[in-house]
Amino acid sequence: MISIIDYGAGNVASVANALETLNEPFVISSNEVEICRADKIIFPGVGEASFAIKQLHMLNLFSMMRMIGKPLLGICLGMQLLCDSSKEGNVSCLGIFPTTGEKFDETKTKVPHMGWNNVNQTKESKLFNGITNEEYFYFAHSFYVPVNNYTIATAENGIDFSAALEKENFYGVQFHPEKSGEAGLKLLENFITLC
Amino acid sequence: MVAKRIIPCLDVKDGRVVKGVNFINLIDAGSAVELAKRYSDEGADELVFLDITASVEKRKTLLELVKKIAKAIRIPFTVGGGISELTDIEKLLKAGADKVSLNTSIVKNPNLITKAARQFGSQAVVAAIDVNIVNNVYKVFIKGGREETELEGLSWCKKVEELGAGEILLTSMNKDGTKDGYDVDFLSELNELVRIPVIASGGAGSKEHFLEAFSKASVDACLAASLFHFDILKIKDLKEFLLANGIVVRL
């Protein structure tokens, strides 16, 4: 069973639709106990970082997410919230990945970074099993995670940034696999079956 | 590098797709969900749905349609048409839409852009702007192109960017339905002026018109409707043509 965390800042419907397509049983929940019962956790996210972190605190999910030893996939803002902090609203985040979310430089590139971009797999990861290198995925974001020790894939928008992260049971993707056609479904399937 | 996007636009009335020529003479072009699926399979990068239903039941019908579309396709889509409240936006996004496009409502209440961007992120807020030439000046039109406003085209585009819009969908009414090409001059100026992505709309009649908009006006995306609905142009053929001419597209 997969649980999709619903904390009022995620595109929950789209992730749920993708899991339905994959015939994966799931629950959508904001309840700590229910989320803990699942085998794997998907942490979607759209919107603004400081609002999202506030929601996690209010729902009492913040510490649980840090401590849980089960595979957890953060999507888009969900991935950024797994880092130490974000410059979006200057907020302290979950602290899994030791880095800070930065804003794209508007003088160098269009912001938001919006559309399909190719993803360069820089380290071996189960998440990208069977997915061609440089495959296109759909992005929609203004803040990014710099390339760091836990980066497993990068994309380019004025600069190279982290398209995916991995550390122990924590995974993150900056793009939206639930909106990235067949390749996106494959990545979600990989997370569910291999990670 | 982010790929240039091809976006079919579906004008929807009561769940069916219609497309006007110069905003009049509507011709039925099929079921919205079926067409959405077809375009997604054929390689469209995104879809835009503009609801032109006028009935009181509108919201409910539209939400049901959005839910069906979100289940049927795995690419992003934008929904627009008569959205004026934050609660409407929230319902549409929760039903599975990725972005909403706002047109008349933001002219009347520019603050709506800022509020929506703050609550849902600017990536979810598309400012749809219809312009037409009046006495040699580009003026902004609202209410589906029926009402002229005092606003000047480029300055309104700059304003929506400052207010927090994540994208501009620019429809050149002077070109819409003519099939003689996008308004490359205006789009070039617009693209110089703003730092958010620009979607060109109005005037596409051939593959060359898309190439021109991407290479000369450097727009981020091109939108078209009847060309695709009536099978005059296949998305795959169009993308292969663009790629062969040096435009980065997703194939």
Image (cartoon, rainbow, N blue to C red):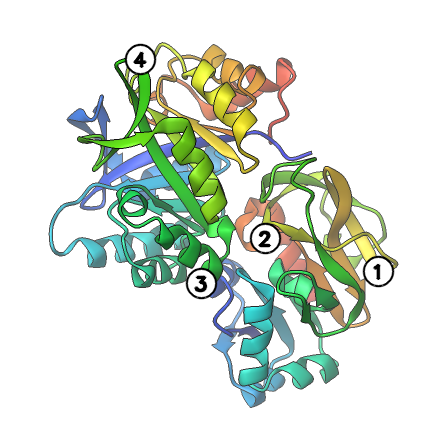
* Chain identity of mark 1: A
**Callout 1 amino acid:** Tyr
The image quarter containing residue A190 is bottom right
Report the front residue among B162 and A134: B162
Report the front residue among B68 and B58: B58
Q: Indicate which disc residue A11 carries.
A: none
Q: What is the quadrant of the N terminus of chain B in the image? A: top right
**Callout 4 amino acid:** Asn
**Callout 2 amino acid:** His
A162 w.r.t. A100: above or below: above
Q: Indicate which disc residue A176 carries.
A: 2
The answer to whether tags 3 and 4 share a subunit is no
Q: Indicate which disc residue A13 carries.
A: 3
* Chain identity of mark 3: A
Report the front residue among A41 and A194: A41
Report the front residue among B160 and B234: B160
The answer to whether tags 4 and 2 share a subunit is no
Looking at the rendered structure, the secondary structure element under dot 3 is helix
Residue corresponding to mark 4: B136
User: What percent of the width, then of the height, locates residue B201?
Assistant: 39, 26
* Chain identity of mark 4: B
The image quarter containing residue B8 is top left
Identified at 50% across, 56% down, the residue is B121
On screen, residue B220 versus residue A67, left or right, reads left
Identified at 60% across, 65% down, the residue is A49
For residue A192, say whether it is visible.
no
User: What percent of the width, then of the height, locates residue B41?
Assistant: 47, 37
Q: Residues within 10 Å of mark 2 (few under 14, many from 20)?
A: many
Disc 2 + disc 1, Cβ < 8 Å: no
Label 4 and label 1: CA atoms lie apart by 56 Å
On screen, residue A143 versus residue B214, left or right, reads right
Q: What is the quadrant of the C terminus of chain B in the image? A: top right
